[in-house]
Image (tube, rainbow, N blue to C red):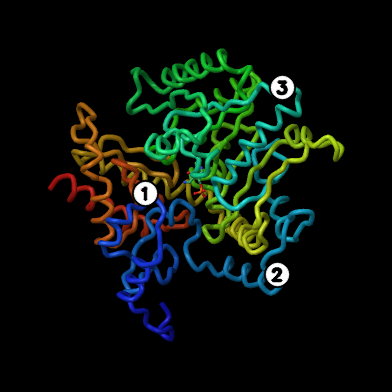
Amino acid sequence: MRSEEPLLNYDELAEKNKRYVWHPFTQMKEYIEGDPVIIAGGDGRKLQDVRGNEYWDGVSSIWLNVHGHRVPEIDQAIRGQLEKIAHSTMLGMANVPAVLLAEKLIHLMPPGLAKVFYSDAGATAVEIAIKMAFQYWQHKGQPQKQRFITMKEAYHGDTIGAVSVGAIDIYRHTYSNLLFSPIHVPYPYIYRSPITGDDETQTAFFLDELEKTLQAHHHETAALIIEPVVQGASGIIVMPDGYLRGVRELCTKYNVLMIADEVATGFGRTGRLFACNHEEVTPDILTAGKGLTGGYLPVAITVATDEIYEAFLGDYEDQKTFFHGHSYTGNQLGCAAAIANLDLMEEKNLIHEVQQQSRYIASRLQEFSKLSHVGDIRQKGFMIGLELVVDRETKEPYEWTERVGVQVCTRAKELGMLIRPLGNVVVFMPPLASTKEELEAMLDILYQSIQEVTES
Ligand code: PMP
């Protein structure tokens, strides 16, 4: 924090936080009794709170930070744009950074993706993908194709459509009467797979399960939605090689659109620019957000092929328009930040760096298998999940009421790193530009926190 700034009174802010703010995914009864971290600043890979404590940003401010905080190039791009205009609508008109960003994105996307539709959150990007796929089949003369296939334990965001295609029960069951019902297929969660065998055997088994579902339902199915390569919110679950490509082939075979939700995996997080790049897959629709602006501003995208886009073209009277748009669609400040972020990623050869540092993380993660309650260690690039279990032999999970993941994260906070668990899975997702020394410090805290909590 810069010293010329007035000192902030923690107690006063905490009281106002308690009195006026309702926090996301938070049981407020418990939260207001606690001692909340109130962030006042950030620098590089660190966050600072109003009391002057510093913490590593160990989950990239919920999976989105790329270069760190207060990145001069992105700061400057936003200031530069601010000198011109902050926002004007995309309804019926265009704006300079939104056009230039779309061009840039299409050149970076898996080949075949051609048109960018902007919004402002991962959930809205998914909502748009669902409506696009649904409407596409109406224009193609197959209005009976209305259903969606989704993976068990999938997460796609918190709006009604996105929750509908989500499959994590705790986020869903309260609202079930509000939601449409997708068709579920098992996700290849190898650690708890119903069959034994190597990755090839697993891939074949799970693709076979999907094919059976497609055979039964393809005539009524608009699209399949999947988090490519890593299923995130279910616990950072990495799919075996060949599965994603197999899904693409089956979608094509059964004439079902494939939506790849890259909100979490996009923009370098898994060690390729997009997770789909690992298997040279082009989905029909790709959603992304989070890292697009480097973790600065809320811009999300739903990107479609020309085949989809062209199905919406027609005379005004045909009513083939895509009736969707948000107030802040194509926001100039956000698009300017995104351009600066992507330029910087290129300039710094960041994807290569992520691959290098991922190898370092992988080597360090081997040590974690010494901890007797670490059941499974999962990593793809800078997405890391450590599944904690009571008993490694039987893979018995901790009771959710024990909140072992929360306990680990509380200890990590005391040791100087902010992370957030997913149930019994401890998640580590550092900013992509973290250096080896920074990763070393963060992994030390991670190790110590897990050790102290699970072996005490
Ligand atoms: N899809 C996936 C795969 C996600 O991981 C998330 C958020 N973690 C979302 C969608 C929703 O994104 P947002 O929180 O920006 O709405």
| Residue to which mark 1 is pinned | 428
Reading the chain from its start, which is encountered first: label 2 or label 1? 2
Q: Is residue 216 left or right of residue 49?
A: right
Q: Which residue is situated farthest in the bottom direction here?
A: 4
Residue 405: give x, y in percent of width and height.
Answer: 27, 46
> Which quarter of the figure has residue 187?
top left
Can residue 424 be seen by looking at this rendering?
A: yes
Mark 3 vs 1, N-terminal side: 3
Residue at the spot 75% in from the left edge and 36% down from the top edge = 306
Cα–Cα span, label 2 and label 3: 43 Å
Q: Is residue 361 above or below residue 372?
A: below
Say above or below: 308 vs 323.
above
The yes-or-no answer for disc 1 within 8 Å of ligand 1 is no
Query: In 3D space, how far apart are the residues under numbered discs 3 and 1 (Cα atoms)?
Result: 44 Å
**Where's residue 447, x and y in %?**
25, 50
- Coordinates of residue 323 in the picture (x, y in percent): 72, 43
Question: Taking 317 as reference, is 255 above or below it?
Answer: above
Q: Which mark is residue 142?
A: 3
Mark 2 or 3, nearer chain start? 2
The kind of residue on which mark 2 rests is Ile
Query: Residue shown at 53%/31% (left/top)?
Result: 180
Identify residue type, mark 3.
Gln
Query: Which circle, 2 or 3, is nearer the viewer?
Result: 3
Q: Describe the element under mark 3 as helix, strand or loop.
A: loop
Left/right placement of residue 280 relative to residue 322 reads left
Mark identifier at residue 436: none
Between disc 2 and disc 1, the foreground one is: 2
How packed mark 2 is, by other alpha carbons closer than 10 Å (few <14, some 14-19, many 20 or more), is: few
Image vertical order of residue 8 relative to residue 43, above or below: below
Q: Which residue is mark 2?
A: 85
